[in-house]
Image (cartoon, rainbow, N blue to C red):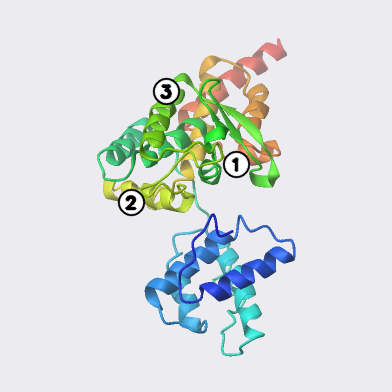
Amino acid sequence: MCRTTTFDGPMRHQILEFMRFRKSLGFAQRNTAYVFAEFDRYLKKNHPKARVITRPMVTGYLSTTVHLHSTSRGYRVTLLRGLCRYLYQKNPAHYVPEARLVPGGKRKLKPHVYTDAEIRRILAKLRNSLVPKAYLTAVSLLFATGIRAGELERLNIEDVDLEAGVLSIQRSKFYKSRFVPVSTSTRKALLIYRELRLESFPTVDCKAAFFVGFTGLRLRAQMTSRIFRRAVRSLGLKTACGTWPRLHDLRHTFATRAMHAVYDSGNDPSAHLPVLATYMGHVNLDHTQTYLHPSIDLLAKAGTKFKAFSGATES
């Protein structure tokens, strides 16, 4: 827990105590620690002398998450309710958030499929900025492979076999592990980055982080998302709905482009869909299909093929 997330806000001891309590009950920490770390950083910045959690602290923190899906915001309320209820047992001065502190109902987010031109602009922006080369390489890898940002964060040196050109994704979502082959160009880019990484932060520990930031510490998915969002906003890129594109949209882009390539090659999409699902680490095809966003051109191609197929079967 402490190796992966730093807590240094005014309520850090209480938050860490609650996280240890949750762990003792068998709850996984990996998918919750980042929320508590967000709240800890918010308190450090805005309420550095806090001794108890108040309603303005919780609502103020939630106001920084308005860009997220309502489900993600509701998840944060649930976690903070657990923390506050735990602390309330020791000190009734702590505020316990209402269950419906965040308005109900899902705000449907339409994923953005990036164009080649948009990707080039984003990568150029990162290349010309002061951020470490790790972020440029990390974003490029997300675009090239469609892996999750959290999977990229957890990559260790031993997980990146650049001789074979394969990434080893260990115990990811649903506790599934898998191998992810990479293209020749991706492999070359990772070789260049690995050389720079080991030159700047030498290590013989094969379990050390592959992607590291300014200080040599593991590159966090949240920071990668923040750097990416900064680049997107500076370029003025918007989705068709007028919102800012997300880092996670690179995964949607990868899946959609992969199926476009299948159609363009004339192969059977239904035969390739299970392969794509396995590559992306999905437990069933329904999960993969949510990442597919066919363009008008692709739908036209599919219609033409179906028309040809139906005509052939009728004859």
Is residue 58 depicted above or below 304 in this figure?
A: below
Given residues 158 and 227, the one toward you in this image is 158
| Mark 2 or 3: the one toward you | 3
Q: Is residue 294 visible?
A: no
Residue tagged by mark 2?
Answer: 230
Whole-number angstrom distance, CA of label 1 to CA of label 3: 31 Å
Give the residue drawn at x 67%, y 22%: 271
Amino acid type indicated by mark 3: Lys
Residue tagged by mark 3?
Answer: 188
Quick check: marks 2 and 3 in contact, CB under 8 Å? Answer: no
Q: Secondary structure at mark 3?
A: helix
Looking at the image, is mark 1 or mark 3 earlier in the sequence?
A: 3
Q: Secondary structure at mark 1?
A: loop
Q: Quadrant of the C terminus?
A: top right
| Mark 1 or 3: the one toward you | 3
Give the residue drawn at x 68%, y 57%: 28
Residue 85 point in image, percent of width and height: 64, 80
Amino acid type indicated by mark 1: Thr
Residue tagged by mark 1?
Answer: 290
Name the outermost residue toward the top: 315
Q: Quadrant of the N terminus?
A: bottom right
Whole-number angstrom distance, CA of label 2 to CA of label 1: 26 Å
Q: Secondary structure at mark 2?
A: helix
| Mark 2 or 1: the one toward you | 2
Amino acid type indicated by mark 2: Arg
Give the residue drawn at x 55%, y 60%: 2
Name the outermost residue toward the front: 204
